[in-house]
Amino acid sequence: MTALVFALAATIAVPTAFAEEGKGGDGDNHEKLDAARRQGKIMPIELLLKLLNEKLKGEIVEIELDDENDGLYYEVYYLNSEGRRIEIYVDAATGEILKGKAGD
């Protein structure tokens, strides 16, 4: 059940990565996201959640897709086993964890 809630929250957060680029409204954003997913530039959120649940020892609480000059990456927030909020950056195409930092 928790994975479903996070998957839905992540799905809502993902289109914001393209919000500034599109001038024709949400349709442009969804088309860009769909094209990026079909081209392998973005890992489907279901697969990302599966990979991260295998790698992380904690509960994922938020996922955002960011579009930077370096490319696309997921910004993932999770609570570790001690209840600390951890932020990691994940390559959007491969699911490789790029870097992370502990939060408050």
Image (cartoon, rainbow, N blue to C red):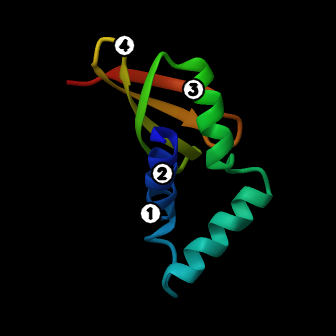
Residue at image mark 3: 53
Using the numbered discs, state the Cα–Cα distance from disc 3 to disc 1 in whole angstroms. Answer: 24 Å
Amino acid under disc 4 = Ser
**Residue 79 locus on image (x, y percent):** 35, 24
- Whichever of labels 4 and 1 marks the residue nearer the N terminus, that label is 1
Residue 78: mark: none
- Residue 16 in the image: above or below residue 57: below
Residue at image mark 2: 10
Quarter residue 53 falls in: top right
Mark 4 Cα shell of 10 Å, populated few (<14), some (14-19), many (≥20): few
Report if residue 64 is visible in the image. Answer: no
Mark 1 or mark 2: which is in front?
2
- Residue at x-position 55% and y-position 43%: 73
Using the numbered discs, state the Cα–Cα distance from disc 1 to disc 2 in whole angstroms. Answer: 11 Å
Using the numbered discs, state the Cα–Cα distance from disc 3 to disc 4 in whole angstroms. Answer: 13 Å
Using the numbered discs, state the Cα–Cα distance from disc 4 to disc 2 in whole angstroms. Answer: 21 Å
Amino acid under disc 3 = Asn
Amino acid under disc 2 = Ala
Amino acid under disc 1 = Thr
- Whichever of labels 3 and 2 marks the residue nearer the N terminus, that label is 2
Residue contact at pointers 4 and 2, CB within 8 angstroms: no
- Residue at x-position 59% and y-position 19%: 55
- Whichever of labels 3 and 4 marks the residue nearer the N terminus, that label is 3
- Whichever of labels 4 and 2 marks the residue nearer the N terminus, that label is 2
Mark 2 Cα shell of 10 Å, populated few (<14), some (14-19), many (≥20): many
Residue 16: mark: 1
- Residue at x-position 68% and y-position 40%: 47
Mark 4 or mark 1: which is in front?
4
Give the residue at the far bottom of this rendering.
24
